[in-house]
Amino acid sequence: MVVALRYVWPLLLCSPCLLIQIPEELMEPPVITEQSPRRLVVFPTDDISLKCEASGKPEVQFRWTRDGVHFKPKEELGVTVYQSLHSGSFTITGNNSNFAQRFQGIYRCFASNKLGTAMSHEIRLMAEGAPKWPKETVKPVEVEEGESVVLPCNPPPSAEPLRIYWMNSKILHIKQDERVTMGQNGNLYFANVLTSDNHSDYICHAHFPGTRTIIQKEPIDLRVKATNSMIDRKPRLLFPTNSSSHLVALQGQPLVLECIAEGFPTPTIKWLRPSGPMPADRVTYQNHNKTLQLLKVGEEDDGEYRCLAENSLGSARHAYYVTVEAAPYWLHKPQSHLYGPGETARLDCQVQGRPQPEVTWRINGIPVEELAKDQKYRIQRGALILSNVQPSDTMVTQCEARNRHGLLLANAYIYVVQLPAKILTADNQTYMAVQGSTAYLLCKAFGAPVPSVQWLDEDGTTVLQDERFFPYANGTLGIRDLQANDTGRYFCLAANDQNNVTIVANLKVKDATQITQGPRSAIEKKGSRVTFTCQASFDPSLQPSITWRGDGRDLQELGDSDKYFIEDGRLVIHSLDYSDQGNYSCVASTELDVVESRAQLLVVGKPGLTYLGSPGPVPRLVLSDLHLLTQSQVRVSWSPAEDHNAPIEKYDIEFEDKEMAPEKWYSLGKVPGNQTSTTLKLSPYVHYTFRVTAINKYGPGEPSPVSETVVTPEAAPEKNPMDVKGEGNETTNMVITWKPLRWMDWNAPQVQYRVQWRPQGTRGPWQEQIVSDPFLVVSNTSTFVPYEIKVQAVNSQGKGPEPQVTIGYSGEDYPQAIPELEGIEILNSSAVLVKWRPVDLAQVKGHLRGYNVTYWREGSQRKHSKRHIHKDHVVVPANTTSVILSGLRPYSSYHLEVQAFNGRGSGPASEFTFSTPEGVPGHPEALHLECQSNTSLLLRWQPPLSHNGVLTGYVLSYHPLDEGGKGQLSFNLRDPELRTHNLTDLSPHLRYRFQLQATTKEGPGEAIVREGGTMALSGISDFGNISATAGENYSVVSWVPKEGQCNFRFHILFKALGEEKGGASLSPQYVSYNQSSYTQWDLQPDTDYEIHLFKERMFRHQMAVKTNGTGRVRLPPAGFATEGWFIGFVSAIILLLLVLLILCFIKRSKGGKYSVKDKEDTQVDSEARPMKDETFGEYSDNEEKAFGSSQPSLNGDIKPLGSDDSLADYGGSVDVQFNEDGSFIGQYSGKKEKEAAGGNDSSGATSPINPAVALE
């Protein structure tokens, strides 16, 4: 009902134009149409006029209240009431100057008729008399030259803003500047007085606009005493006088802040906003920067504003804390509505303000609190709700919201009427639309209650069963995706509780217009012509039309017959130019629909060459407003560049200073591509030469010609250096460094730096020095002392802004603090937690950067390592006093050092030794399976490289892999020296998985796994793919072991074939099947050999090979000299003699004084023993055995592998050269000899037979 009837009242007022029978007795609730302003100030010579006008039917009656009490204007003396329709206004005319004060108060007007009462807002009437300055005796003001003074004005109060002027007796304004200024309160402030200020006629004039009068204060005599010694003093605020103040600003209103300071020299004022940037578009600075005015204050302007008064001696500041509040304003204003009986009326009243306004409701001018409790209304969340309204519920409501900043009032009526249903849309109207579009059938109805609207087809069935049909709240029926069979008649039925009416709407669906062939985009050269074609299909019953448009303009309307030719769907453009390129559209239309097809035309300069790329050069550049150079500004204008078919996105404005940085261009900023001029903010003292470059999506074009050179005037620096630091590079100095200003920030030909420093925490004077280089060395400082540092830029025009204070330190010394270890917690066999107490910072002698934790392994717990020590390091942050050392070797001894360090280096170390517990061992190094029979296997293995403790034995587990096999079997081998084990009673037809683990007291370690079976499973030994190759004196036999074949050992024999009977044979060699190849040396060149492979006297394979060479060498009969034992014996004798010679040489070089160990421990650490190249069948003894037990020494003086000697012992005195095979030759000198002479207990000599001693 609300939606349909909200427009009824204006319709009723215009009933003749609708030709509808409207009841003449329909009434109108009262509506206030005009009223006086909320605040009315009257003066003695003014008449008082209070206005209140309202409309309504029947005629409106008016009444007034003053200060909440009924007020009858007609009964008041001197009151004239307007005798006009719809007006309750009146005028009060007085006969003396004080009559208006009798009528001061708050007035309110009420306009009523039978339908309710409307109410005006509050009208505050204020009467103001003639202004007079109070009588006072003005004494002369005496002040000494250079001091500050304030001349008070104190004008009479007024309800309207005053205008204050300070003049002399000649009616000349007192000149105001940074030194002399008038405040917002009218007082005249002198930051410091001069003898020229000595006058006896300082007169304050107050202009009252309301009374149109100006009054003046008694003249003030200012007497200035001259002095020869004016004392400089730092700034002090004259207004405001305290350090901070709180202000409330009203949203949407201007905010004015003021700071006036005194001092000598005259202070300057700066304004800051710590919480964010100043809103530059709304802030202005007036009165020589002493006044800040912020326009249209918003909530975002909340916060702190700070004024800073500065001169060369210091500064003073004041903080304004601004809170933005707001008078009430509407979020949702209640609106008048018409309702039908039985409906629910709802009036929403939502307001906002700061503080949150209080909302009250009135009905017909009476507060709801004063109405009877049985009323049917209710107030819910600021809304007034009436349910099941009846004509008797017609009323005028008032929503009033107020806070301390203002009041809002809205009148809104609820008008309940009864009207029969009526359809305003004409009957039997015809609608036409094309297929695929949407048709709208109108049925605008009204009535009270709101009539329901239905749409029916010719069968009387509702049309809403088809989802393409959808109704609107105003009765309109929409039909989307029209089809040809939608043509027909539709009936609109409107009904309420009083009657129902029907109209007919006829719908005709036509064929849609289609473009069957549209224009195509083209690229044509300049001066040629282009033809676009367009064909379309139309409904035959409609009038067709084809038009052409170019970039949105109708080409037929241009009337340029020489340029365009349009006929039968063709567009021909002659004499193409760059201005012709763009988008061209074919528009096919009827009175029902319009379709369009577009094509793009590009015009190029040469055949096949399109200017799709970066823009052309900016042709012209002009400088103007050169008078602004004194304000470091200039205006740059240029002609637009050719866009080359890609719109120009922006222009880049650059400058060059040929004096300071020739041929180097700097960007001053970019402006939008549709802009061809801008005003630039320049820096002082720069030789500006400008150029402009156009940029589009393809990149920048060529720059414009350069402009004339302009020079901005010099000025004091506006910036100070950044990154100021103070650090010592020696213990008795401090080097102050900073990032120098760029030349464009010098603001003068040269710039220097004023460096100031003093010890932190002292109030003493600053030491300072002016330098040109970006550093200063302060000498003779104490070690690591904090200093306050300031660096300020200075030039010939003055100093830069007051610099910030930076804390620096003089040089550091090496720390003296020793970290005190709290203990070491063993976490597991490979990790420990180290803790220490924080060091005394006073002993650090600098900034504590952290702790260096160094640790190294000294060896296993069985034996310390004799090898070169590898040290690990961990750097711990200064705020941490613990670290976890992980990745340690189990069952090992470690040495630990902790040092504090600063920027100078590390201090003394605290030392500690700890041991890691035993862990589980590593996996055995090798596991081989060797077939013994159809039911047995021999397992061979090597012990693990990493014992991680004391080996206690091995765990052997195995289980069959095939189905039907037995479960896993496991047993312990208690002998740690064991290297083989024979397994029997194995199934000949099953494949097994074998797992071997070494054990310590901590348990078994990682396992090594192998799979295999017995001889029966692998079958007959097969030397598949066996081959032999030969050289001059050797032959290589290679074979590919069969997958799954059990390993076994066999003999290989080379037998020479030749002239002698049976040939000559070499000794058979024992070979492992899994090693895949064998090399036989000592063969004769150019000789045929038979190769026999046999196992356990069973022949397996035979093959032949011939060595290379030119002839066979006759071998002499075998004698003892060719036997291996003889050769080995001779080699040992030679080696022994060589060792003895070296020992004698060492003894001679030591003067015959050297000590010999009485007894050497020949046990070596398992990790220090070098591993031999492994071949099958060669196994070393347990690592616990002494090296000497398997390799007897030829001389008791030769040191074992466990010797303390290492390369580290010789430091820089070792000259080492390595041979190709990895051995080395060298001579020891210097340090090594000195240590031996000093009593080194090692008497072993370096020897070629024991190179491992040195390599470790």
Image (spheres, helix red, strand yellow):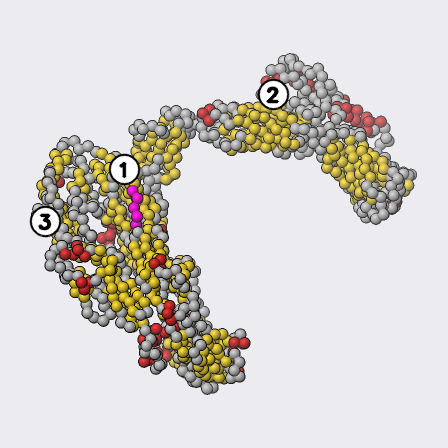
Can residue 1088 be seen here? The reply is: no
Q: Are marks 3 and 1 in contact (CB under 8 Å)?
A: no
- The nearer-to-camera label among 3 and 1 is 3
- The residue identified by callout 1 is 315
**Image position of 793 with respect to 128: above or below:** above
- Front tag of 1 and 2: 1
Callout 1: SS:
strand
Binning the other alpha carbons within 10 Å of mark 2 as few (below 14), some (14 to 19) or many (20 upward) gives some
Mark 3 sits on what residue?
171
Residue 177 image point, x, y percent:
19, 45
Give the magenta part as a residue range: 245-250
Left of 451 or right of it: where is 861? right
Amino acid type at circle 3 is Ile
Residue 786 lies in what quarter of the image? Answer: top left
Pointer 2: what residue?
A: 1232
**Between marks 1 and 2, how big is the CA–CA gap?**
72 Å
User: Viewer-proximal residue, 1120 or 705?
Assistant: 705
Q: Position of residue 50 (x, y in %)?
A: 21, 62
Of callouts 3 and 2, which one flags the residue occurring earlier in the amino acid sequence? 3
| Up-down relation of residue 96 to residue 819 (above or below) | below
Q: Residues within 10 Å of mark 3 (few under 14, many from 20)?
A: few
Q: Is residue 997 left or right of residue 933?
A: left
